């Protein structure tokens, strides 16, 4: 198993096919990263929202005020 | 036969807790396989005699297409389980599988288009394989849209599940399209019944990438399902305890 290119510059060009290959790579990696990062952010956001609701409920119970 | 494991698997709490344990390892394995497979395919696999370096797109195109199809099967199966056993978790899995499947189908179409330009001279042709993949994308969109088309969650789940099940008829059509019609698309590189039509030096990194995509799919699906579980179970005691524990840890860290 050998590295198929003289140097990284040649790997970037890929004998004229670089544009196509790297476009596929970039779009694919972008999509994969989005598929993982977006649920992680949503997870954090959801925990935060549930926490806020809990605090609000506690405050309401303590004060007996239904309007908070 | 003892079926308790089956029902336990349908419990959102059980799913959330057991995936918490496995997520770090799953993420690590996915990352290692993806990086290794991509470096191997892009830099070390030999150049194709006819297609030159453009063939390297195969290392993304084939895994994405595989998982777009396998993901559809999973989504339809989850829908069927939901319809039959009314399991809470299976509808959640079905709902979460739809956007992931749509994204992978888009990737299969996109990488196919940029591979088509240098190979066939065109980004897009209305060819049997490509058109049936486009239909798959619309099926995924349909399942997603039906989820939000009903006020009643249960009705939305049932409608999505039925559409997903009816749509499975498209899967063998996609798979067989290169044999049934004259198409520009090259025949399958990998067949269950015969040896791959590729040199092992090219084929091994492809296998690594397919494996990487399977792991990635599991990771993305589990992450999405966990969010959905939290949202739906937000009133339960275990989620409250989890949130309280998380906020205590935050205060402790500060």
Image (tube, helix red, strand yellow):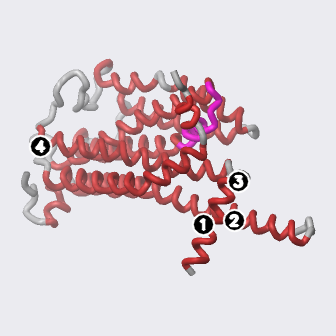
Q: Toward the viewer: B253 or B45?
A: B253
Which numbered dot is residue B43?
none
Asked if the residue at tag 2 contacts the one at tag 1, i.e. Cβ–Cβ closer than 8 Å, the answer is: yes
Q: Is residue A27 visible?
A: no
Comparing marks 1 and 2, which lies closer to the viewer? 1
Instruction: Report crowding for label 1: few under 14, some 14 to 19, many 20 or more residues within 10 A (C-alpha).
Output: some
Q: Chain of mark 4?
A: B
Identify the residue at image location x=29%, y=42%: B210
C-alpha gap between disc 1 and disc 3: 14 Å
Q: Chain of mark 1?
A: B
Comparing marks 4 and 3, which lies closer to the viewer? 3
Same chain for marks 1 and 3? Answer: yes
C-alpha gap between disc 2 and disc 4: 53 Å
Specify the segment rendered in magenta.
B85-96
Identify the residue at image location x=48%, y=37%: B137
Same chain for marks 2 and 4? Answer: no
C-alpha gap between disc 3 and disc 2: 13 Å
Q: Point out the tag, 1 or 4, that comes first from the N-terminus.
A: 4
Q: Toward the viewer: B172 or B90?
A: B90
C-alpha gap between disc 1 and disc 4: 48 Å
Same chain for marks 4 and 3? Answer: yes
The residue where tag 4 is placed is: B201
Q: Where does residue B133 sit, x and y in percent of width and height?
A: 41, 33
The residue where tag 3 is placed is: B237
Q: Is residue B153 visible?
A: yes
Instruction: Report crowding for label 2: few under 14, some 14 to 19, many 20 or more residues within 10 A (C-alpha).
Output: many
C-alpha gap between disc 4 and disc 3: 54 Å
């Amino acid at each position: 198993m050998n590295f198929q290119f003289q140097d990284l510059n040649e790997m970037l060009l890929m004998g004229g096919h670089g544009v196509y290959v790297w476009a596929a790579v970039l779009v694919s990696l972008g999509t994969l990263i989005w598929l993982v990062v977006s649920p992680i952010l949503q997870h954090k956001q959801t925990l935060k929202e549930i926490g806020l609701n809990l605090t609000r409920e506690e405050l309401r119970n303590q004060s007996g005020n239904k309007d908070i | 036969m003892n079926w308790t494991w089956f029902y336990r698997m349908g419990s959102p709490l059980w799913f959330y807790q057991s995936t918490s344990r496995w997520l770090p390892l799953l993420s690590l394995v996915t990352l290692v396989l993806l990086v290794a497979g991509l470096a191997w395919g892009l830099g070390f696999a030999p150049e194709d005699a006819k297609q030159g370096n453009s063939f390297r797109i195969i290392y993304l195109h084939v895994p994405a297409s595989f998982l777009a199809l396998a993901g559809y099967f999973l989504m339809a199966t989850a829908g069927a389980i939901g319809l039959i056993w009314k399991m809470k978790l299976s509808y959640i899995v079905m709902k979460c599988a739809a956007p992931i499947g749509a994204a992978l189908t888009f990737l299969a179409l996109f990488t196919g288009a940029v591979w088509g330009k240098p190979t066939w001279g065109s980004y897009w042709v209305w060819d049997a394989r490509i058109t049936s993949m486009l239909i798959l994308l619309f099926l995924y969109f349909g399942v997603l849209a039906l989820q939000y088309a009903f006020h009643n969650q249960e009705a939305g789940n049932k409608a999505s599940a039925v559409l997903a099940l009816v749509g499975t008829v498209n899967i063998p059509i996609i798979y067989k399209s290169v044999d049934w019609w004259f198409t520009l698309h090259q025949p399958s590189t990998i067949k269950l019944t015969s040896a791959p039509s590729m040199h092992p030096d090219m084929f091994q990194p492809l296998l690594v990438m397919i494996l990487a995509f399977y792991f990635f799919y599991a990771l993305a699906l589990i992450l999405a399902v966990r969010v959905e579980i939290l949202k739906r179970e937000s009133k339960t005691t275990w989620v409250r305890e989890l949130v309280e524990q998380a906020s205590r840890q935050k205060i402790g860290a500060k």
